[in-house]
Amino acid sequence: MKKFMFLLAAMAACVTAGAWNYRNFVVDDVESIENGKEITQRVRLSDFVGHGKYILVDFWASWCGPCRGEVPNLKAVYDEFGGDDFEIVSVAVWDKAEDAFDAIEEEGMNWTQIVCSAKTNQIPTQVYGIEGIPYIILIDPDGKVIGEDLRGKQIRKAVKKALGL
């Protein structure tokens, strides 16, 4: 019991300190749908994180009103900061691939998209312990999570601060 309490205290200290290592996940990313069948490729969060850029990871679903409400904030941040030092990776979870693709097109989400297959669409939120979406985290170039559960104006503020602007 004492070990368990110590681990909880240590984890709380890491979160309170504002930086903890990202947790990798592997999913089947749906590239397209042909004749009603998902055409997938394996993708890892580590394909994007730890390569010299700040990465904003947006966990969302097409049916989620608050998720779709964050799109204008994400667009503005991507338009202002996207490039050599910063990228957004949106991860469609708890959703049908067809619906996610429709929403991506409707919303004009022109940054990196991972559309999880029906088989793997719960893995990212299980890995992160996410119980609700949208859930947006900011990861530094070394793979440290430096902002989590960002919403609205917090997104731009966190990215701007991270980039030293």
Image (cartoon, rainbow, N blue to C red):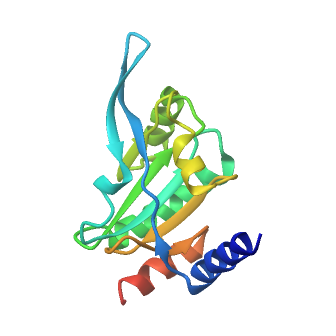
Which residue sits at x=29%, y=53%?
Answer: 47
- Residue 137 picture location, percent across and down: 51, 66
As displayed, is residue 45 above or below residue 83?
Answer: above
As displayed, is residue 29 above or below residue 9?
Answer: above
Which residue sits at x=60%, y=77%?
Answer: 15
Which residue sits at x=51%, y=28%?
Answer: 119
Depth check: 90 or 26 in front?
Answer: 26
2 on left or right of 48: right
51 on left or right of 95: left
145 on left or right of 81: right
As displayed, is residue 125 above or below residue 159?
Answer: above
Q: Quadrant of the C terminus?
A: bottom left
- Residue 43 picture location, percent across and down: 33, 42
Depth check: 163 or 152 in front?
Answer: 163
Quadrant location of residue 154?
bottom right
Quadrant location of residue 8?
bottom right
Depth check: 133 or 63 in front?
Answer: 133
Looking at the image, the residue that sits furthest to the top is 35
Q: Quadrant of the N terminus?
A: bottom right
- Residue 80 picture location, percent across and down: 36, 72
Which residue sits at x=58%, y=75%?
Answer: 153
Looking at the image, the residue that sits furthest to the right is 1
Q: How many marks?
A: 0
Depth check: 110 or 35 in front?
Answer: 35
